[in-house]
Amino acid sequence: MRNFDELTEREVLALAISSEEEDGRIYGDFSERLRADYPASAKVFHDMAAEEGEHRRMLIDIYREKFGEHIPLIRRQDVRGFITRKPVWQSAALGLDIVRKQAASMEAEATNFYRAAAERSQDASIRKLLGDLAEVEAGHEHKADQLIAENLDASTMDAEDEANRRMFVLRIIQPALAGLMDGSVSTLAPVFAAVFATGLSWDAFLVGMAASIGAGISMGFAEALSDNGSLTGRGAPWIRGLICGLATTLGGIGHTLPFLIPNFHTAVSVAIAVVVAELAVISWIRWKYMDTPPFSAAMQVGFGGALVFATGILIGQG
């Protein structure tokens, strides 16, 4: 790899040409990935890819005028410190907001690249050329805003944002909520049964850790094997399984950790407080993302948790 400040004017321009081609293909990938769920945004990125192709042709004309027909192959990965971008195909899922922000970042970074190159140039003609390229990239950024304004009216933006929210709930919130509920509620009975049966905090801690980790593994596999997401739109099964499994384990460990406290009464009191906090968080998530009325969410989760909690105590004292 070479440092950017070691490149000649010819090499910088060749690098700009290859970068424009790469950015155009990235926008094309964005368009293809968004086409099924966000057709209006897909058209925006299709048009932006066409714009990048036009700018690349303009840069090639400038290069030919100054340096002839042969354009050396100089890519981003060949230059130390140059802008790098993660290939789109390596991303399992691309949210609409992520794509829009990445597109804005791409144009801003390219503009900064050309301006930085112009500032370090000591030759007037080179400085002018690089300054012109910076203006071209700044024009790209304004063009992106224009294309979005032309293709995405307020109602379309609202519809796509709502679709994005639904997919977030379907692919992230639902498996996480299922895990939290299972981990927080189902492990109450064995943990409190163990502590009231033995009177020893350490025994309850071991039972709680075993129940939490075991439930996390079980729930993770169950979620991952439930469907492959091709028909339901729930996304990659291994991602859902991982989210669900981790949430399940977290939900159980929360009220298990207090039993590291040696004193029986203190440990039980802290654990009960953690349980209340866990159930409150679950109720809030159900209200925030699942459109459940706050009172109904609190009653449903609280009743279930209280029932399992009472079961554990009765068994432990039996």
Image (cartoon, grey):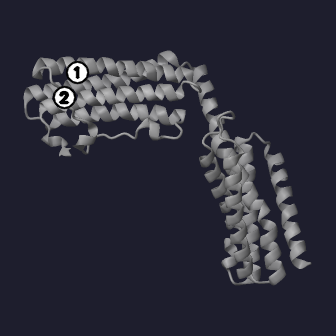
| Residue 13 numbered tag | 2
CB under 8 Å between discs 1 and 2: yes
Residue 234: x %, y % from top left: 65, 39
Taking 300 as reference, is 229 above or below it? above
Residue 181: x %, y % from top left: 75, 55
Residue 34 visible: yes
Taking 109 as reference, is 142 above or below it? above
Q: Find residue 112 and report its image quarter.
A: top left
Where disc 1 sits, the SS reads helix
Q: Dot 1 corresponds to which residue?
A: 59
Where disc 2 sits, the SS reads helix
Residue 148 visible: no
As drawn, is 276 to the left or to the right of 26?
A: right
Q: Residue at x 13, y 42 (%)?
A: 6
Locate the C terminus and report the quarter of the image it occupies.
bottom right
As drawn, is 209 to the left or to the right of 73?
A: right
Residue found farthest to the right: 318
Q: Between 139 and 164, which is closer to the camera in this rendering?
A: 164
Taking 153 as reference, is 250 above or below it? below
Q: Residues within 10 Å of mark 1 (few under 14, many from 20)?
A: many
Give the amino acid type for the residue marked by disc 2 in the picture. Leu
Q: Between 224 and 309, which is closer to the camera in this rendering?
A: 224
Give the amino acid type for the residue marked by disc 1 in the picture. Leu
Q: Find residue 316 and report its image quarter.
A: bottom right
Residue 43: x %, y % from top left: 49, 19
Residue 30: x %, y % from top left: 46, 29
Q: Residue at x 27, y 29 (%)?
A: 18
Q: Residues within 10 Å of mark 2 (few under 14, many from 20)?
A: many
